[in-house]
Image (cartoon, rainbow, N blue to C red):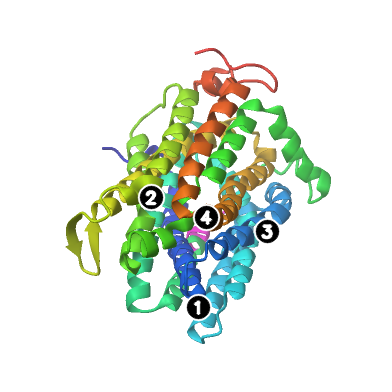
């Protein structure tokens, strides 16, 4: 084991540590919100759970077109100060409403939408800033470490959410999340000024937003990864139905739900740590496609998990029994998380290396629509399908849809299959309409 190269750069180290704490809080809140909705409805209601996805995606669609030009025009570090503060205040509002007993599903939807609007500006600024604090040679490692931070948060956050809900109460998950944003704000203070190319600052207007779309549609290698990301997450949004799977199918309590919600991220962190020790990922296009296929297959396995030894008790932990079905579901989610991390690292590296700094914020903002649009619209789709055919059916059909979609995209854009990953460093990066160098 060695210290990952990206963490040797002090400013990135500060940001990474801040995100590690903040993302744990955000994932705690996200897990708690799903459980909160399930509790408020009083009975399984897939449409209510699917509605949270709609509340998140609408602000992203509306504001992401502005988030990119804002990130390319104004100081990205200052933008992060504003967005992180706004998200902290939103979490405080959730805590206050829950503590006073005035919380409703509609308040949850409204505050979730408000937080998503802040994230629409936060994401482009944060991701576009990373290449300014990490050299090109260490950029893939930086994205690997960012993935580890996000997924470590997705392990710690959901696990803590289950314990906190069961012991202290729902409102404390929101309160702790509000406090966690202070870690990123402190990191931004310690980082100091960050250089940024503002010579071609586009200004905040409609044509500047369209430049991001024009750029992406001229780069087939970037466009294909974004479409793949959208399709895979739209169909395979298995986590949406986790509260129902945990409480009503696997028959576990809040703690069991928290661990099941952490499973995907446990697999993600494991894969991220392995990749952080690899200097170069070979045949990145084929590795990316294989990872998406494994993600779909793991989702199908998760959908069938409840039929595999549901009554076979392996052992018991305080609060819930561990059945064979629970273990299979846990391992399936972990495998899906590992595959998703591999694909995430590769597609983020492809996009950043093939995008000039002056338009990087707008590229990220368009990608945000694909990246968040897939899972959030997928939550709505899952809610509708689950209400018609049941939760297992929506999970299994989603995994199959992911596999079919991935195959069609690979056929449509063969540049993905041939992409090696060393084209940028060798000066042979794919052009707007040219094929990648054959493997």
Q: Secondary structure at mark 2?
A: helix
Q: Secondary structure at mark 4?
A: helix
Q: Residue furthest left?
A: 315
**Among the two numbered marks 4 and 3 on one chain, the one whose residue lies closer to the N terminus:** 3
Which quadrant, please, contains the N terminus? Answer: top left
Tally of numbered discs: 4
Tell me, yes or no, whether the highlighted magenta stretch contains residue 201. Answer: no
**Among the two numbered marks 2 and 3 on one chain, the one whose residue lies closer to the N terminus:** 3
CA–CA distance in space, label 1 to label 2: 25 Å
**Among the two numbered marks 1 and 2 on one chain, the one whose residue lies closer to the N terminus:** 1
- The answer to whether residue 8 is visible is no
What segment carries the magenta color? 186-193
Pointers 2 and 4 in contact (C-beta within 8 Å): no
CA–CA distance in space, label 3 to label 1: 22 Å
CA–CA distance in space, label 4 to label 3: 25 Å
Q: Position of residue 419 (x, y in %)?
A: 53, 21
């Amino acid at each position: 084991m060695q210290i990952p190269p990206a963490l040797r750069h002090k400013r990135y180290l500060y940001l990474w540590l801040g995100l590690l704490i903040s993302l744990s809080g955000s994932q705690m809140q996200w897990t708690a919100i799903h459980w909160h909705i399930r509790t408020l409805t009083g009975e399984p209601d897939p449409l209510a759970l699917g509605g949270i996805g709609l509340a998140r995606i609408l602000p992203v669609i509306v504001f992401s077109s502005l988030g990119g030009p804002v990130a390319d025009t104004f100081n990205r570090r200052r933008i992060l100060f504003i967005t992180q503060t706004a998200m902290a205040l939103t979490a405080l509002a959730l805590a206050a409403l829950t503590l006073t007993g005035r919380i409703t599903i509609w308040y949850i939807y409204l505050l979730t939408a408000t937080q998503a609007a802040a994230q629409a500006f936060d994401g482009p600024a944060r991701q576009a800033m990373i290449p300014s604090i990490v050299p090109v040679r260490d950029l893939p490692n930086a994205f690997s470490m960012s993935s580890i931070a996000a997924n470590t948060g997705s392990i710690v956050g959901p696990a803590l959410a289950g314990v906190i809900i069961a012991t202290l109460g729902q409102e404390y998950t929101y309160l702790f999340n509000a406090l966690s944003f202070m870690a990123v704000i402190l990191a931004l203070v310690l980082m100091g000024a960050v250089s940024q190319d503002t010579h071609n600052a586009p200004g905040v207007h409609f044509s500047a937003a369209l430049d991001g779309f024009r750029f992406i549609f001229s780069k087939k290698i970037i466009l294909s990864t974004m479409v793949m990301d959208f399709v895979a997450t739209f169909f395979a949004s298995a986590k949406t139905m986790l509260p129902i799977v945990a409480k009503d199918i696997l028959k576990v309590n809040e703690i069991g739900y928290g661990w099941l919600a952490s499973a995907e991220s446990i697999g993600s962190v494991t894969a991220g740590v392995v990749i952080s020790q690899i200097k170069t990922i070979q045949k990145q296009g084929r590795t990316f496609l294989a990872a998406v296929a494994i993600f779909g297959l793991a989702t199908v396995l998760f959908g069938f998990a409840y039929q595999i030894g549901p009554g076979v008790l392996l052992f018991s932990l305080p609060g819930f029994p561990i059945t064979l079905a629970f273990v299979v579901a846990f391992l399936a989610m972990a495998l899906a998380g590992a595959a998703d991390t591999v694909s995430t690292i590769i597609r983020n590296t492809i996009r950043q290396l093939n995008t000039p700094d002056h338009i990087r914020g707008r590229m990220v903002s368009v990608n945000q629509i694909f990246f968040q649009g897939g899972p959030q619209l997928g939550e709505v789709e899952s809610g509708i399908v689950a209400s018609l055919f049941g939760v297992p059916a929506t999970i299994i059909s989603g995994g199959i849809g992911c596999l079919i979609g991935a195959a069609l995209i690979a056929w449509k854009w063969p540049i993905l299959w041939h992409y090696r990953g060393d084209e940028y460093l060798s000066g042979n990066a794919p052009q707007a309409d040219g094929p990648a160098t054959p493997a």
